[in-house]
Structure formats: C-alpha cells, structure tokens
Amino acid sequence: MDAFRESMLQLITQTSTNLPPDVRRAMASALDTEQGARSAQALNVIATNIDMACDNEGPICQDTGWPTFEVHTPVGANQIIMKRQIQEATAEATKRGKLRSNSVDSLTGANSGDNLGPGTPTIHFAQWENDDEIEVKLLLKGGGCENKNIQYSLPMELPHLGKAGRDLDGVRKCLLHAVWQAQGQGCSAGALGVCIGGDRTTSYQHAKEQLFRTLDDTNPHPQLAKLEDYIVQTSNTLGIGTMGFGGGVTLIGCKVGVLNRLPASFFVSVAYDCWAFRRLGVVLDAKTGEIKRWLYRDEKEPAAQMSRGGGFVRTGKEKVLRAPITEEQVRELQVGDVVLVSGEMYTGRDAVHSHLMKHEPPASLQGSVLYHCGPVVMKNGHYRITAAGPTTSIREEPYQGEIIKRYGVRAVIGKGGMGAKTLAAMKDFGAVYLNAIGGAAQYYARCIDEVLDVNLMEFGIPEAMWHLRVTDFPAIVTMDAHGNSLHADVEKASATLLAKLAEPVF
C-alpha cells in the first residue's frame, strides 16, 4: 500500500482544516436562529473562521486536539505497518503546521514536538469481512472540550436537579447537567457523545465513539432518539449561548449509545465536543492505500460558505485599547464593552503561569496584555503565527490573581471566564478579562502583525511565552474592574432555569 501514508496525511489535513457538511449545517442553523447580540457576534466570527481555515488549509482551532483513529481492515492486513505509517503521517502533519504539537510527557512536562509518544495518537483497529477496502475515521478533539467530559455514577444527587436515579430520566438529568457545567469553557455551541452503561473505561470510549455519528442522523432506538432530541431542544432554553455569552444556541447535537453494565454499576459518560467538531473519514483501496471516497462529505460538492458578514461587525461603539494600558483606561471599561486591542501582548498558558509564581517574568508585564493562547507556529527564517485562538482560562485561576497583583497585568484575554479570586484581584488592582472567541484560530492569527520575541521555549511551542504585536484584536469585556462577571451571571441564571427541569419527563 504505497499510498497509505499520503492518504493519512490528507485525512489529517482535511480533518483539521475543513469542517464536515453536517457540522456546517448545524452552525448555519445556529447563525440563522441566534438572537443574543453577543452570541450572534461570536457566531459571525466563527463562521468567517471556518471559511478562512478551509480556504487556506489552516487549522480551524489552534488546539488541533487529540487524534483518535478508528480503522477497519480486511482480515490479515498488516496493522503494524499501518500504525507506523499513521504515526509518520501525524508527525509530518505537525511539521507542516496542520497539527499543533500536543503530545506532552506526563512526568517531565516535555513536549515531543511531533505529536508522537506513549498513547498518541490513539489508534483503534478492527477487522471486517471486506477484502477490497480499508476504512479510516479520524476525530480531533481539543483539550478545552476534553476537560468538560464528565462521568456520572447513578444514583446520585445533581446540583439544581436533585436525585438522578437508575433510569432514563436519571440519564436525562445527567445530560442536562453536563451541558450546564460546561458553560462557555468547552466552546459552546457544543455536542454530546453519550454512553449509558458499560464499565468506567468502555463507557467513556463508547461515548467518544458516538461523536463519529453525523449530527443529523436518527438513533435507531426510539427512546434514545427521543432523548437526543429532547436534550438538544431543552439545552437551548438554558440561556447559556455561544461561548457562554448568553443566548439561544448552546447545543448542536446529542448522540447516545448504550452498553450492558454490571449489576452494581450504572455509569453515564459524556464526551463533550466543541463547535469545531472535526471529524472526517476515508475509504481506501486495500491494495494501494489510495483514497477511493471520503466519508461524511461529497467531494463533488464544494464546502458551503459560512460567513454572512465578514466576521466581527463593527458598530462604532468599540473601545480601543493600545498596550501598554493604564489603570484609568481599564477602570473605564464595563462588562459588555467590545474592545479592539492593538500594540504588544504576551501569550501565557499553564506552564508560564506556574513559572511566574516562582520567577520574575522574562520581560516587564506592567500595563501588559496576557493572552491565554497556545499558538501554531511556523518558522521559515522568522517565526509566523498561523493559528492563535484562546485557550480555556479557568485552568489559570490558581495563579491569575497573584500575577495581576505582582506584575501589573491590565488585561487578560482567554475564553470561558475565570473565578472569584481573579475577579477580586481585577477589582483590587485594576484589570479586566477579555473573552475572545474560542476556536477562531485563523481569524485571530490575522490580527497578529509579527512575532517580536519568544521566551521559555523549553516548555514547548504551545506553552512558550510569545511576544506579539497585534492590530485591532477584537474581544468582549466579560469581567471588569468593578467586580462584575458576565460568566457568573450567566451561570446563575442558567442554574435557575435548570432547576425548573427537575421534575420527571421520561
């Protein structure tokens, strides 16, 4: 199979850069129905980003996720060679900037740099009685939504919903809670892959496998089909909205599978996926490895254009921030203000925040903008950022308040919001949280004029501290220097609506 490796490289590239039609249809519907102003603005940026990624073969989201391959082979096919060539294609895709280097040694924290290492990528092989063809499906699922996966062991008490028993109504409550607890941190509008039953391990795996179904299919089990439809419709009444900004589109799909279970166990496992639902597949000639046809899409039909208005639509009411930023400028901002950031900013994720708790920063952060971002970076004589959306900020909650206090950071950019400690520090020392649109990696990369410097490269490209110059970088103030938090408000309001759904339905 001389063409197998190249076919895998094409599959990885297309999965990372080109959303399948069923996801595009779901997002187009979200664009048509969303009434919330902030969520509608976010969806416009998302739609433009989807088009940019497809047109330029750039990653839709800078977090290109954890690659999971599902491979069906003829009996007797050499799976050892196929595994090696999938790994080679994964490394090559990383080298070409189609994947971000995401494989990190759990003991040392060292990034492998090529997405290879124990467990990565994940490859599941199965045989089928088809001698002529090989089927390979790929799911790229990012860390932000992966962190919102959740597993329930019934019976149990659920916040705002009460007791969830070992029945379909108990499952219903689990799924509503799964959506509510994700808020905007998992880049809503999202989708759920669900497994009822199994043991702890197989339950999570089967939940993730449900994400290989199309969003518009119909579950063959009537009760599960009814449950899937109910969860999508009801989740969209909770007022969480795109990015957790408040609005009417929170979920674009729910796919439920079921496994037998032990008498003593009743698990409900949820694999939460973001709007950047990257899943594609190919059918290959078993003799040559060449692609015979694509799964999930028709190659004869070009990808439908998503953008309705060129992305971020200016109203003239935007506030302009040019770094370095003063405390006076920050204290004039209010939750809901749309800002355009220009000047210099620094990226910093988990490793940088941990480092700054023990060491002075490599550059002055007084009046600075700190961007929670792990970019995709290419180098050809100089560094170039090719994908640069925000990462989920709540992971930095243990550090952020102290870093604001110590170093005079005036603006933090990320997604999903932060907690009470950070909010208090922003009020005490004069800082704001700016919510960028999660997953809009191509859109935000266009706002970056140049890489000025990079520090702490020993942490790997995603975790290094990149010094950037940006122009008109759009974001929304969701936590201000007066103690106000849109994220806390939406979570509280959606909890009230969730509590009204405690009575049995199934």
Image (tube, rainbow, N blue to C red):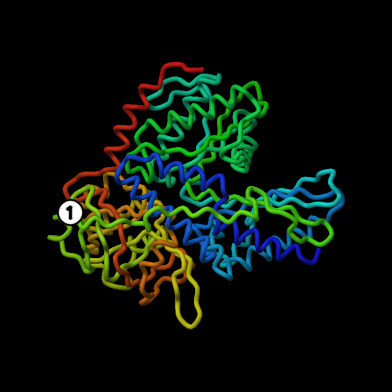
Note whether 435 is above or below 128 in the view shown. Answer: below
Note whether 31 is above or below 449 in the view shown. Answer: above
Task: Give how far across and how far down residue 296 sits, in percent.
Answer: 63, 48
Question: Local crowd at mark 1 within 10 Å, few (<14), some, or many (≥20)?
Answer: some
Task: Give how far across and how far down residue 137 sits, in percent.
Answer: 67, 50
**In the image: residue 436, left or right of residue 441:** left
**In the image: residue 158, left or right of residue 135:** left
Q: Quadrant of the N terminus?
A: bottom right
Of all residues shown, which one is farthest toward the bottom? Answer: 381
71 and 157: which one is in front?
A: 71
Give the structural element (helix, strand or loop) at label 1.
Answer: loop
Image mark count: 1
**In the image: residue 372, left or right of residue 77:** left
Note whether 244 is above or below 55 in the view shown. Answer: above
The residue that label 1 is drawn on is: 333
Task: Give how far across and how far down residue 62 sits, in percent.
Answer: 47, 60
237 and 44: which one is in front?
A: 44
Q: Residue at x 78, y 52 (%)?
A: 134
Looking at the rendered structure, the kind of residue marked 1 is: Leu
465 and 196: which one is in front?
A: 196
* The quarter of the displayed image where residue 445 is located: bottom left
Q: Residue at x 45, y 41 (%)?
A: 29
**In the image: residue 335, left or right of residue 374:** left
Task: Give how far across and how far down residue 162 sits, in percent.
Answer: 41, 21
